[in-house]
Amino acid sequence: MAMAQAAGAPSRGMTREERKVIFASSLGTVFEWYDFYLYGSLAAFIGATFFSQYPEATRNIFALLAFAAGFIVRPFGALVFGRIGDLVGRKYTFLVTILIMGLSTFIVGLLPGSATIGIAAPIILIILRMLQGLALGGEYGGAATYVAEHAPDNRRGFYTSWIQTTATLGLFLSLIIILVVQGSMAKEDFAAWGWRIPFLLSVVLLGISVWIRMTLSESPTFKRMKEEGKTSKAPLTEAFGQWKNARIALIALFGLTAGQAVVWYSGQFYSLFFLQNVLKVDARSVNIMIAVALALGSIFFVVFGWLSDKIGRKPIIMAGLALAVLTYFPLFKALTWAANPALAQAQADVRATVTAAPGDCTFQFNPVGTAKFTKSCDIATGFLARNSVPYDIVTTAPAGTPATVAVGGATVTSYDATAAGADAAAQGTAFNNAVHAALHDAGYPLVKNETTGAYAMVADPAAVNWPMTIGILFILMIYVTMVYGPIAAILVEMFPTRIRYTGMSLPYHIGNGWFGGLLPATVFAMSAAKGDIYFGLWYPIAFAAMSLVIGLLFVKDTLGTNLHAKD
């Protein structure tokens, strides 16, 4: 009854202080996501500056550490800063996180490359990246909790939905600045030093964000609880060591954030990867398409946050999960026809066949890009998968014989890279050229470099249907806003005030950092194993379906929860 009354209470206008709270929290979080995305968007230039001078084994270690910092470290940041936030306060904790993130990003822009300071350069870079991951792990929970504890009970979905726009706006901002900087100079200059400019510009956002956050007061809910002496003495133990609270965290993870994460990563990140790496659309066009879809769709974070104050958080999130489960396959197939119709037609007409010995084909899961797949079958299937060619695997070849690739009327023999030794590079070039030539003859959209004789799979720019492609990206974006717009409100309302920062941050960052972060590598490995560019979509569909079922059964709608009384 109390919840219903709160949900149906008359709405009042947003006060000046509440607007400042939302603006300051959102601006700071946009800035942190902007910093976080820069590293991923500019990874190739960063790698060339800091890692390329080292042996392959050393580069692999650095790549692994960078990956760990980007995704695996985030939940640990949630634990560290969540605990501090529940002990000391929300305001000062996320003030610390923004300083750590901002200074780390600015220093990346100034850091000399390995050609100048040797191995110290990548080591310092990895330390800065880890600090970024830790800071991001503490930022989101602090901002969401801070805004939620300032919001009226019947407008909390609307207020916190502004925080939900920040990840998308951070990505949007990073894409726009990179595009502007790239367009203002030669490619060689951007690769040499221009990539540093977006990192250096972040210091302006840092200054503005810190100044605004310094003017804020502590969350009234936390302040009242602290004055009453009700703060937790051991937030981690209380949040995860007591079953009543640990159960909430598990339900939040498996019934909400795991599914939300895969829908979010599919709509905003995998769609970008799919267009660029699978459909072979040029990177600049992809960035523009994604930026347009983000610009059109971002307002729906607020729309669905507002709607969650009317009909509840759970129905909107569950509907977004259900739509993703039901429509991902047709949407991504439609995306292929829109962005690269020649490839779509070739896939419909021609399949390759890989014939290999039993045990010669492995599951090519490679999240950090360091694993080497050297067997003849893995080389063949990996090459076909990277070129978006559907294929069947037949394991009938005699043991010890190399795999073969049959396309149309041509058959090309693969090779074992380990056995080839010093000849591996030459054999690889010959194999790639031969398969490319067979694919070209079979109708695949490959362009031949007349100087080198090598082929490359491309999407004809004149054939790309921009309106349809952006329209499909927009639909995927709507799913993102449905699952993500109300998520902050429902998470903060699930946990008691004394452990809220800690309790809601960990399942959020495990869901998004691990379930979401592993999505691109897992999807590729699944598609390569099956010989189908769409097969990997079962990964987000499976986890979205899992969260849909668990959410329907165990998640209680929190609309109208009184945070001041929830301790």
Image (cartoon, grey):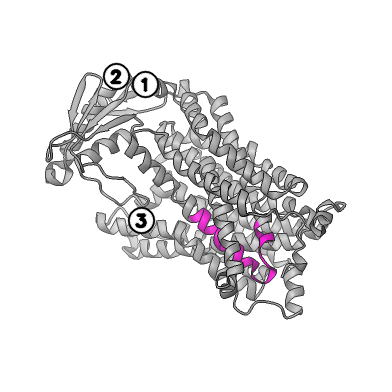
Quadrant of res 54: bottom left
**Residue type, numbered disc 2:** Ala
Q: Residues within 10 Å of mark 2 (few under 14, many from 20)?
A: some
Q: Secondary structure at mark 3?
A: helix
Where residue 456 appears, as percent x and y from the top left, is 32, 29
The magenta-colored residue range is 491-513
Taking the image as shown, residue 376 lies to the left or right of residue 484, namely left
How many angstroms separate mark 3 from mark 1 (CA)?
35 Å
Q: Which residue is mark 1?
A: 346
Which residue is rendered at x = 20% and y = 35% of the image?
A: 356
Where residue 382 appears, as percent x and y from the top left, is 29, 38
Where residue 188 appears, as percent x and y from the top left, is 39, 42
Quadrant of res 316: top right
Q: Which residue is mark 2?
A: 442
**Quadrant (top left, top right, bottom left, bottom right) of the N terminus:** bottom right
Looking at the picture, does residue 88 appear above or below residue 461?
Answer: below
Do we see residue 299 in this rendering? yes
Q: Residues within 10 Å of mark 1 (few under 14, many from 20)?
A: some
Which residue is rendered at x = 25% and y = 57% of the image?
A: 57
CB-based contact (under 8 Å), mark 2 and mark 1: yes
**Residue type, numbered disc 1:** Ala
* Magenta-colored stretch includes residue 317: no
Looking at the picture, does residue 456 appear above or below residue 36?
Answer: above
Q: Which residue is mark 3?
A: 63
Q: Tell which circle, 3 or 1, labels the residue nearer the N-terminal end.
A: 3
**In-front residue for pair 422/512:** 512
CB-based contact (under 8 Å), mark 3 and mark 2: no
Do we see residue 217 in this rendering? no
**Quadrant (top left, top right, bottom left, bottom right) of the C terminus:** bottom right
